[in-house]
């Protein structure tokens, strides 16, 4: 990604990710959040951040972004609003060749049910199949699930070990699905990591 790319983080919190991007040389960075405290913290750290509701930002903003990040935000939104919100992001905030990076807790993981209820503000939770569906319904044409096994950043030896263990885990899952006469949708990618990362355009 070009260092001059316009980048927006929706639900930027205290700006940890934006600070990392700044350290990597990206400088056209904007964050929005509902928390006064979080926004002030970003501003103190020289990160451009605005306290604004997403829908109001869509209405007021005339700027287009090359890359938009929503990390652990979508699961806090009302289910009947999600597709409209994603559609608004695509049509009003993304540039013509822009991409949306969407990260959500994974309902198919071992802790899926836990994360649905552990955080009282979670209203819904996604599998790869349901996330693919809402992105398609919101007008996105290309959807890529990235780093599904969470191997990014690991050493080669750890990648090999984790890959082997995941194969055994998936074989075990397949065995018990057959024994219990249950199944996953064949069309949905089988992702078992704690979170799902999707890149959409």
Image (cartoon, helix red, strand yellow):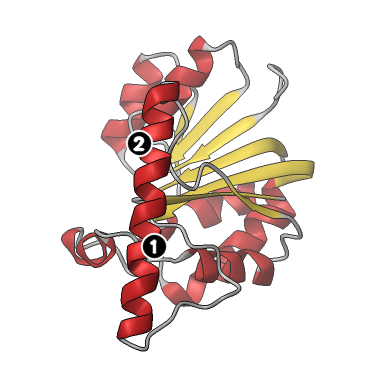
Q: Is residue 91 above or below residue 20?
A: below
Figure label count: 2
Q: Earlier in the sequence, mark 2 or mark 1?
A: 2
In the structure shown, which secondary structural element does the residue marked by tag 2 occupy?
A: loop
Q: Residue furthest right?
A: 96
Residue 163 figure quarter: top left
Q: Is residue 107 above or below residue 105?
A: below
In the structure shown, which secondary structural element does the residue marked by tag 1 occupy?
A: helix
Q: Residue at x 60, y 15 (%)?
A: 27
As rendered, which of 87 and 41 lies closer to the eye? 87
Neighbor class of circle 2 (other Cα within 10 Å; few <14, some 14-19, many 20+) is many
Q: Residue at x 47, y 31 (%)?
A: 152
Percent coordinates x, y for residue 24 in the rendering: 54, 12
Point out the frontmost of discs 2 and 1. 1
Q: Residue furthest bottom?
A: 181
- Is 100 positioned to the left or the right of 110 in the image? right
- Is 168 positioned to the left or the right of 111 in the image? right
Q: Is residue 61 visible?
A: no
Residue 155 figure quarter: top left
Q: Residue at x 47, y 39 (%)?
A: 32
Quadrant (top left, top right, bottom left, bottom right) of the N terminus? top right
* Disc ID at residue 13: 2
Disc 1 target residue: 171
Percent coordinates x, y for residue 41 in the rendering: 31, 23
Q: CA distance from mark 2 to mark 1?
A: 38 Å
């Amino acid at each position: 990604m070009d260092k001059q790319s316009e980048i927006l983080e929706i639900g930027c919190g205290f700006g940890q990710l934006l600070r990392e991007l700044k350290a990597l040389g990206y400088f056209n960075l904007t964050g929005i959040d509902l928390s006064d405290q979080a926004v002030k913290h970003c501003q103190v750290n020289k990160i451009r951040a605005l306290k604004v509701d997403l829908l109001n930002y869509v209405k007021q903003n005339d700027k287009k972004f090359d890359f938009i990040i929503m990390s652990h935000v979508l699961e806090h939104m009302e289910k009947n609003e999600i597709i409209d919100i994603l559609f608004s992001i695509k049509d009003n905030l993304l540039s013509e060749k822009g991409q949306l990076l969407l990260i959500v807790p994974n309902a198919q993981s071992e802790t899926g049910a836990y994360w649905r209820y552990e955080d009282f503000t979670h209203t819904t939770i996604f599998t790869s199949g349901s996330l693919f569906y809402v992105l398609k319904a919101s007008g996105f044409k290309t959807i890529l699930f990235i780093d599904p096994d969470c191997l990014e950043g690991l050493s080669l030896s750890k990648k090999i070990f984790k890959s082997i263990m995941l194969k055994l885990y998936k074989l075990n899952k397949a065995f018990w699905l057959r024994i219990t006469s249950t199944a996953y949708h064949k069309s949905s990618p089988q992702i078992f990591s704690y979170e799902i990362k999707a890149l959409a355009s």
